[in-house]
Amino acid sequence: MTSPTESGPVLDAASPLPPEIEAADEPTRVPLAIEDWATVLIMGLLACITFANVLVRYFTDSSFAWTEEFSVFLMILLALVAGSAAVARDRHIRIEYFAESGSMARRKRLAQFGAITVALLFLLIGALSVRVVWDDYRFEETSPGIGVPQWWYSIWLPIVSFAIALRALGLFIRRGRKTNYGDSER
């Protein structure tokens, strides 16, 4: 172990993460482990599908037809789930110069404005994508690669969009309650 002044903070043997990373997640009503485990499962599924396709292609000079279509779907779902985790953890993109300058009241208002803007955007995306899912179902659209019903893929856009909106609303509420926004970063 090194001292905090030599090469960073001293790590506790019981904690594998540095204190600033370990304390990064704020308490939420809905556990953040949902997005974490969904990310792990999606990444694992992507790795298995890709590995199986590589093996089949190597040994047979052909590939599974469904892997590309399903992998693209999983990557899109992964981006949405990761977006939900980023919103819940308040790790979304922002211009730090504006977000972390000024008074605490200004920083709090900017954080709330960002959270409510994200919530409104994903509520709109969710509402509009419900129509897309309905059209896919009603017109019996099939996927271009393997011919499964298209709504099997598109149903996840409104579900995850509404989840992101709810996470953003939760962030808005937490930022409204927080009295010392931004002090820990300074």
Image: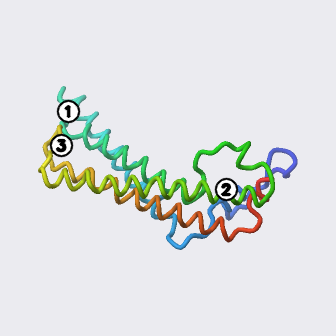
Instruction: Estimate the x, y position of residue 159 in percent, counting from the top left.
Output: 35, 60
User: What sort of colour scheme is used for the picture?
Assistant: rainbow
Q: Nearer the viewer, residue 136 or 144?
A: 136
The image position of residue 132, as x and y in percent, is: 26, 51
- The residue under the point 22% across, 53% down is 152
Q: Residue furthest right?
A: 5
Please tell me whether mark 3 sits on a helix, a strand or a loop.
loop
Please tell me which residue is depicted at 41% across the width and 55% down the height of the picture. Answer: 124
Decide if residue 150 is on the left or right side of residue 107.
left
Label drawn at residue 21: 2
**x 15%, y 48%: residue:** 148
Q: Mark 3 is on which residue type?
A: Ser
| Left/right of residue 53 with respect to residue 27 in the rendered view | left
Name of the residue lying farthest toward the top:
61
Q: Which amino acid, by three-letter code, is at mark 1?
A: Ser
| Residue 1 visible in image | no
Q: Earlier in the sequence, mark 3 or mark 1?
A: 1
Q: Position of residue 20 (x, y in %)?
A: 71, 56
The residue to which callout 3 is attached is 143
- Viewer-proximal residue among 90 and 130: 130
* Mark 1 lies on residue: 63
Please name whichever residue, 89 or 47, is drawn nearer the observer in this view of the structure: 89
Whether residues under marks 2 and 1 lie with C-beta atoms below 8 angstroms apart, the answer is no
Tell me the distance, in whole angstroms, between the alpha carbons under discs 3 and 1. Answer: 18 Å
Q: State if disc 1 and disc 3 touch (CB < 8 Å).
A: no
Residue 128 percent coordinates (x, y): 33, 53
